[in-house]
Image (cartoon, rainbow, N blue to C red):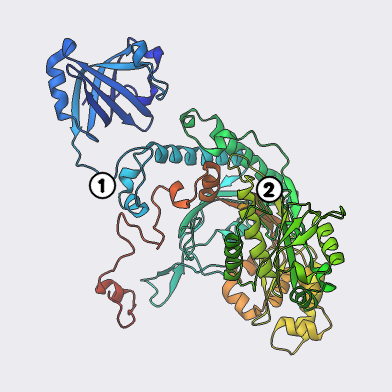
Amino acid sequence: MKTRTHRCGELRKAHIGQAVTVCGWVDVKRDRGGVVFILLRDVSGKVQLTFTEQHNKALVDQTREARHEYVISATGKVTERDAENRTDKLATGEVEIMVESFEVLNTAVTPAIEVRDDLKCDPELRLKNRFIDLRRRPMQAMLQARAALVAAARKTLEAEGFLDIETPILYKRTPEGARDFIVPSRAHQGQFYALPQSPQLFKQLCMISGLDRYYQIARCFRDEDKRADRQPEFTQIDLEMSFPTRDDVMELFEKVVVAVVDALQSDARLRDMDWPVLKAGKLSLPFERMDYETAMRDYSIDRPDLRSRDLRLTDLTGWARTCSFNAFKGTAENGGLVKGLRCPGMAEAFSTGQLKNLERDAKGMGATGLANLKVTSNPAGNGGALGGGIAKFIPEAEQKAMIAAFNAQPGDLLLICAHEKHKIVHAVMHNMRVLIAEKLGLSDPAKFAITWVVDFPLFEYREEDEKLFASHHPFTLPQKAARVHELAEISRKGREPHPVARMLHGGVKLEEILALRNNQYDLVCNGVEIAGGSIRMHRTDWQADVFELIGISKEEANKKFGFLMSALDHGAPPHGGIASGVDRLLMLLLGLDNIADVIAFPKSATGRDLMIDTPNEVEPALLKELAIELAAGKRS
């Protein structure tokens, strides 16, 4: 085999007259009788090889050996294509190689899937034949974009003085919100490692070690239920810094995001792709900020899609307390929530059957129903009236008050949900808002609406067992650490079984506890959280206070986090950081729907690697060596 001089996609008019050698896969072969064309493909692109009987008949005959997906090497002279044969579909479309010699380097069987850009087939078939799937241009371009994204993040962080530090993969179980993957130890039978859900504790230890600025392109593992935006193993851009304010971390990460988008938009290798990031304009700094309360009030979710910014929700709870419709009134009087969505100009956009389907969807999320009302023209000329199933139960004055609350106009559709559980109302109304935004054409994937969401609750409350848990993670610094300490002291002195009961007995209201805020910040783009972080706890007394309120005893804290508590005792600096999922961020920028499409070798929806067939069974001797015995009915 002759030494390759160029890659296929590199050849241009500037190379005309040069003798070159290229290698790659046969993409297409066309025999025109006396003239044979082979389109040769490698990761850089495609180039046309031309064989003519006039130039070398024996070579034309030899091309019969070359078939689809064969690997060949070709040597020849770069020439300009005839005007009628030029194409702008290829970067090399103005030139071709007049082949003087070529060699079949390897043959190929017919692949199970076609190597074509617009491939449509069973996703599991693609995963099973991933090594073939990755030959396709969209997949190779995706991996080029992924590499460019990571390189841009690295360059930005290193320019800011961050040090790339690896943290352990064999880890320890920590309460981070998902199930851990467990690894048995042969040397310590009956004991286990866990794979890290994130490097959270180790990056804090880096700050305590005085390393000042850490980052890592970190592998993370979570045994979660499968969704389109989840994989059991994933990658994140992870960073931590000492002595920061919240603004320092946020402003730094804004630079990373802008650098990533600029890198993709300026990468010449990607110009042939039809991705949202390549159509979008440049990002401008600083990014918008929105507090959690505003996000929940206006959009019923803490990661709002602001492409449809003006499609806001309306809180009708105050109106409902004095209304005549008992379903709304009773919900409001019992501490529930009543929220509605004004759908501008959509009074006739849904049929009766479609409205019933919306109600069915709401009930599927736990709601008792979904009311719909149409704002009709009013002969009296005083701003409209309501029509629809429940309109007859609402007097005219109350109708006017509702219309005013929505700032509604004739021709609008109003969707209303009421329930004593606020979470159900938020879930229903968020989903209705997403549906209406799409129907109104407000979800352009080439538009990136980015905002920070800040001032999250410190705790969430689980009614079934009357317990608090950290809304972010238990290492996040409260905004009012002194008040948290006072509450922890009340809890420590109480005799009730749970911290919440002890605080309530001590005269603290649940509303006050849930009003506490933390130093968390999430970066949201088009309704997707693309990064999240917080200022951390750096004092053991503050950390112990939070552990007390979420029901982690001193003994349990020492068992699970003894190394961290000890480290905090040795002069921990104030510190904070952020992490961004590389896979999810890239999926958003490329306008894809499944995270598997931005990972080279992903798992299937059931968590299996279909190509190498894993997870799989292991031999009984290994299980015995690990002191593991399978439950009855489970094969080894």
Q: Residue 387: percent from the left, percent from the top?
A: 74, 62
Q: Which residue was labeled with disc 1?
A: 112
Compared to residue 25, the image places residue 54 above or below, namely above
Classify mark 2: residues with Cα within 10 Å, few (<14), some (14-19) or many (20+). Answer: many
576 left or right of 587 in image: right
Question: Mark on residue 149?
Answer: none
Tags 1 and 2 touching, CB below 8 Å? no
Rendered location of residue 470, percent (x, y): 67, 69
Q: Earlier in the sequence, mark 1 or mark 2?
A: 1
- Camera sees residue 528: yes
Residue 560: which quarter of the image?
bottom right
Dividing the picture into quadrants, the one containing residue 493 is bottom right
Q: Nearer the viewer, residue 474 or 462?
A: 462
Number of marks: 2
* Local secondary structure at mark 1: loop
Q: Work out how far the residue at label 1 is from the one at label 2, CA to CA, in angstroms.
A: 43 Å
